Amino acid sequence: MSAVLPARPVNDAGPVAIKRRSPVRPYHVIVALLLLVFPFVASDFWIVQIGAQSLILGVIALSLMFLAGYGGMVSLAQMTVAGVAAYMVAIFGVSTTGSGLSWPWWAVIPWAVAIATVYATFVGALSVRTEGIYTIMITLAIGMATFYLAQQNYTVFNGFDGFKGLEPPHLFDVDWRDPLPFYFLSLAVAAVCYFFVLYVSRSTFGLSLQAIRDNARRMRALGYNVTLHRVVAYALAGLIAALGGVLSVWYNGRVSPGSIGITPIINILIIAVMGGMLRPAGPFIGAIVFVLLQTFAIDFIDRERFNTLIGTVFFLVVLFSTDGLLGLWERLRVRLTAPRAGPAAELRDGAEEQR
């Protein structure tokens, strides 16, 4: 007697479509409106020194978050990658030192970004076979080797002095050095990088990279090329850091070995960890807090004690949250809404956070 399978229910409305959640959320719209309105109500100082600088540092820290959050690889060479792009802008472009090649901007920017991305890929190829503290140490060693190369080489990198008088190009009859245009240029680059990271994290490559982060041995047994995935991740992170490096050299108007020294390298790590290493918004939040402390802390404490202050803030954030300031906010939000929404909402928020 043959088994009879139960009949599947018939859906008169036709096949059920699977809805894919859009990466754009309501809070994205709110934050976008605030960022667009901000330069029209703030002074030039706040627009450039706070707004633009936070966006630039956030982009560079975002490249570190991409590697660490989705790939489980903490690289201390991301500021160095940004510095390589900045140096290429100075070498290929126009500077007051007169040692640049004076190429047009439309040739300088692609070459600078491409060379910095290749450099990041080289860093990845050397470090992907290591894990944990060894990855941190080898990327730091590569960064410091680049620092000393730039400091001691006068033929290409102009030694300790570096390059000065570097300015963004004049395009569409707009002076991009002015606070308002430069802020919106930084905002546009930051937005592109932010949504690029969101898109990659939801792509097949991004999901595979996160699976490799969780269990590289199992993914290798399933036939995935773990090494190639990690090297490509370094290349994508290098592309993001390179764009931040181009903006940084236009913001500072100069680049020197001090731009890629140990202090900027550690600052990027502090920004990424303090804001949150698990979501793309974290580096930008960390950058805002870092820039505000860097700018206004000297009004209350000696300049020499700034590192003590930032270290204390960093320690407190890490002590109370594994996901930086974003993690603290999520815990506070759940705690405030839990009594009103009940346990079911906590479970739903937890599942939402896991996605």
Image (tube, rainbow, N blue to C red):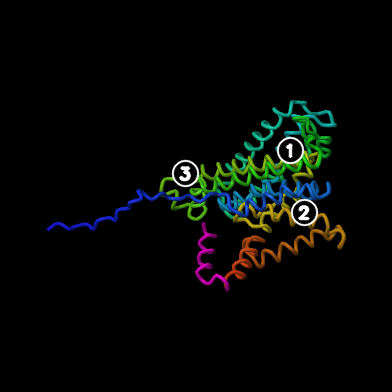
For label 1, the residue is 86
Q: Position of residue 81 (x, y in %)?
A: 68, 42
Mark 3 or 1, nearer chain start: 1
160 is higher (above) or lower (below) than 219: above
Q: Which residues are magenta?
A: 339-355
Mark 3 or 2, nearer chain start: 3
Give the amino acid at mark 2. Answer: Val
Q: Tell which tag, 3 or 1, sits nearer the viewer.
A: 1
Q: Which numbered tag is attached to residue 30? A: none
Q: Position of residue 8 (x, y in %)?
A: 28, 55
| SS for dot 3 | loop
Give the amino acid at mark 3. Answer: Asn
Q: Is residue 254 left or right of residue 120?
A: right
For label 3, the residue is 225
For label 2, the residue is 291
Q: Residue at x 71, y 38 (%)?
A: 84
Q: Tell which tag, 2 or 1, sits nearer the viewer.
A: 2
| SS for dot 1 | helix
